[in-house]
Image: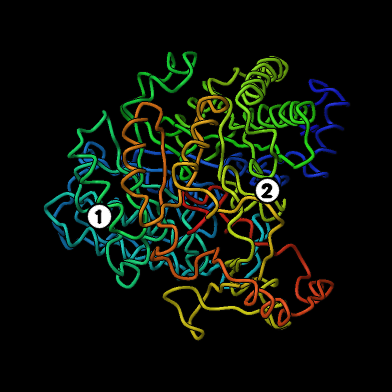
Amino acid sequence: MKKKVGPRISDKDYGDIRQAILEQKVVPSMRLLWSSGTAVDKTNVCAYNCSFIVPTRIKDFGEMMYILMCGTGVGFSVENKTVEQLPGIKNQTGELLPKFVVEDSKEGWADAFIHGLDAWFNGKDVEFDYSQLRPEGARLKTMGGRSSGPQPLINLMEFSRAKLLANQGKKLSTLDVHDICCKIGEVVVSGGVRRSAMISLSDLNDEEMQNAKSGEFWNNNPQRFMANNSAVYNEKPNIGEFLKEWTALVKSGTGERGIFNRGSLEKQLPARRWEKFKTFAQTCGTNPCGEIILRNRQFCNLTSIVAREDDTPESLMEKIRLATILGTYQASLTDFKYLSDEWKINSEEEALLGVSITGAWDCPIIRDAHLLRKLRDHSIEVNDEYAVKLGINPSTCVTCIKPSGNSSQFLDTSSGLHPRHSKYYIRRVRISKTDPLFRMMAEQGVKYHPEVGQTMENAHTFVLEFPVESPDGVYKDDLSAIEQLENWKLFKENFTEHNPSVTISVGDDEWIQTADWIYKNWDIIGGLSFLPRDNHVYQLAPYEAIDKHTYEEMAAAFPDIDYSKIFDYEREDETQGAKEYACVGNSCEIV
């Protein structure tokens, strides 16, 4: 930061920010914290948490792949008006193009995918030479971690080719485009980590998308795990339309599709943003977690303050100041190599920030409307001041609440607006089989399972299990669905200029009253996710409540890990940052 900004920020500010990060009072974009140095210098995409794209061109699929390979979450639209802009698929002519040599880089993978799609859309075929790609397990010098080898890219090529050739003389359906996008997300991550890095927006009346996750979809379409699905509402639905979609959501067991309320954005966004945003409103979308409203081809960066039990109004105001300075700096990073110019233009024009709060249920004083408004207004003022210092536009939208499902584990806080899961629970963590940390944990006796749909013999992703005891406090099942929604409303109306991201846990007897609350509060609903409190369909979920006896048994059996042994496994930087998406989905507390 100091290297890029220099004296435009004072030495005191640098020192305060550094100390606040070290003391876990604020966190910058965790993506930037991981990628600082060579990776982010090569492309600033690595610094950003989230993005949104409306894929209407063949090139857009390659850009989506590139962004995902940088570790940034992607939202995308498969609305009819989007998909119908893609070209029709010509009948195969038998023409075989020269063999295409795939270069061993993010750009090389994306270029190869674009080349293949272009050939298949235009009735031609092409073979690929993957010999230049590093083998599985080879070290990735710039991005860290280990190579997945060529097989994931081969899988994507074969999957996409089959989709297009099955639709010769026609156009792809919305579900076809959705599946291709999900497959991109699946193959980018070594082994296809199940947690979502994407969100798919579809028309309210799209029944194929409504049923995309019906039944045991993971058996035949496991790529669909990669995206959370939300229905787009361009206006308030009549009660029949609303209840039809709500009933499908309840029956699914997945809590999908969620709600993306495009029609009420004018009432929700600050006036200074709406003036610049209104011409983009009909094609806008959201990031995978639902807290940021984005134009087509736009990024957003996130920062957080960490709310603690002993915080005071004064300490929270200082935290929000430092988190906002960090976010303003992050918004200045707009060197997006490889991508279309629109990404830079849109991101610079609005210079979006996403200053968030995590640990809301750990800090009693923060759930106060007056204090929340003070924090929001102070964040806006600080951004205005430091945008001038850095020579960028002031942000048109500053505050949000992100889920913080990953960072809360590191910070030992409740996640965003969510209370802690329960007093005792199993925390499951997904990890690549080539990660030295996995080998170290497994060989010391930590319990693990192959990922859903994989076996011990063929798994490339494993799931580690950790028993956890939470401190005394508020837990998920202590709050009714309506209490969770009222807490969301408190932050929505008094803190966020964007949106608070939350997954509402709903009991079997709460679905009707929850629907009533949503319909009555429609004008403030930006994006919400719902999940059955207990009987969801997800296997090996990241959180599973257990009783005290089970916890004590698991804790007693859990090995005493010798972390110094990591040096025996990891001789160089082999962390899996590139394969852990910054923005992992609006149900990231569960999936």
Image coordinates of residue 72 in percent, x first then y, are 54, 46
Q: Earlier in the sequence, mark 1 or mark 2?
A: 2
Q: Residue at x 11, y 53 (%)?
A: 169
- At label 2, counting other C-alpha atoms closer than 10 Å, the crowd grade (few under 14, some 14-19, many 20 or more) is many
Observer-nearest of 7 and 472: 472
Q: With 345 as the anchor, is 582 left or right in this view? A: right
The residue identified by callout 2 is 35
Q: What is the distance, in whole Å, between disc 1 and disc 2 at their CAs?
A: 33 Å
Horizontal and vertical percent for residue 466? 65, 70
Q: Residues within 10 Å of mark 1 (few under 14, many from 20)?
A: some
Residue in the picture at 44% in, 50% down: 198
Label 1: element kind: helix
- Image spot of residue 339 (x, y percent): 48, 38
Give residue 154's mark.
Answer: none
Residue hosting label 1: 176
Which image quarter holds the N terminus? top right
Identify the residue shown where x is 85% and y is 32%: 16
Q: Position of residue 180 (x, y in %)?
A: 33, 56
Identified by mark 1, the residue type is Asp
Q: Amino acid at mark 2?
A: Ser
Q: Element under label 2?
A: helix
Determine which quarter of the picture holds residue 218: bottom left
Instruction: Farthest residue to the bottom: give it.
Output: 457
